[in-house]
Image: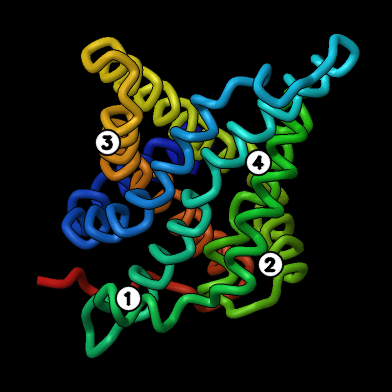
Amino acid sequence: MSRRAELVSTYARIGRTYIRWAPSLLLLALAVFAPLGLLHEVVINAEIGSFGFGNGLKLVGAALAVLAVVGVGLIGEVFYTGAVAISLTHPKEGRAPSLREIAGMVNYGPLIAIDVIYSVLVGLGVIAIVPGILAYVWLGLAAPVVEIEHCGIRAAFRRSVQLVRGKFFLVALVLLPIEIAGDALTKVVTGLAHHAFGGSVIAEWAADVLTNVAFTPFYAVAAVLLTVDLIREKGGGAELHSKPRP
């Protein structure tokens, strides 16, 4: 299969999986992003000047602001992807686990650590652009790996690199456009909410949550499908073998 055909096939499968699993994906997204959306809005609306940076530290302050915005934006997205990996690959009596069952199955320690470490690495890299993109792609499958293969933090990052090796452009051309489109949609919707409601944090929080609930499942499904495919390609036994809840 050519690279283009593989890319088109992957996007088609992402769309079909999203539609098929939409009810459980959206409910899970709401549970994750409702609280995190408020934190995101607090960071976005914070003014660097309020931290008292002097002229000599303004550049540092701006860099920290970029790191904070990128980091908070990714936090939750990574955790949610791990939870989706459970939903799509860990059946309970032949169907997807419930929210309560997922809550009991999540490897909280490793997944939260990966969430934070990945967000910091990508956020720091974004300041120089290219390192951020490389970190985003090479380490982007660590969260689903944790939940599919039940490995630790370092092992998950190493496994992500191993899976991406030889498939970098496929992973990049799937995950990066979804991430960019999701961020753009979120900015547009929150901007409209800001214009309509005069900068109300609650309105912007609601807009942020709604866009994340609608769009982040695309990213999560993409990451999980890529992870499962690449594990199988490299000799593993992962598969999507559970059915959505009725």
Q: CA distance from mark 4 to mark 3?
A: 27 Å
Residue at 20%, 54% (x, y): give it.
Answer: 22
- Considering only order in the chain, which callout, 1 or 3, is on the residue closer to the N terminus? 3
Task: Give whichever of 28, 52 is nearer the camera.
Answer: 52
Q: Residue furthest left?
A: 246
Closer to the eye: label 3 or 2: 3
Q: Is the Cβ of the residue at disc 1 closer than 8 Å to that at disc 2?
A: no
Q: Residues within 10 Å of mark 4 (few under 14, many from 20)?
A: many
The answer to whether 49 is drawn above or below residue 120 in the figure is: above
Residue at 79%, 20% (x, y): give it.
Answer: 53
Q: Which residue is mark 2?
A: 156
Residue at 56%, 60% (x, y): give it.
Answer: 230
- Considering only order in the chain, which callout, 3 or 4, is on the residue closer to the N terminus? 4
Looking at the rendering, which quadrant does residue 59 occupy?
A: top right
Q: Which residue is mark 1?
A: 241
Dot label at residue 206: 3
Residue type for callout 3:
Ala
Side of 184 where 203 appears, left or right? left
- Considering only order in the chain, which callout, 2 or 3, is on the residue closer to the N terminus? 2
Q: Which residue is mark 4?
A: 136
Q: Residues within 10 Å of mark 3 (few under 14, many from 20)?
A: some
Q: CA distance from mark 1 to mark 2?
A: 22 Å
- Considering only order in the chain, which callout, 1 or 4, is on the residue closer to the N terminus? 4
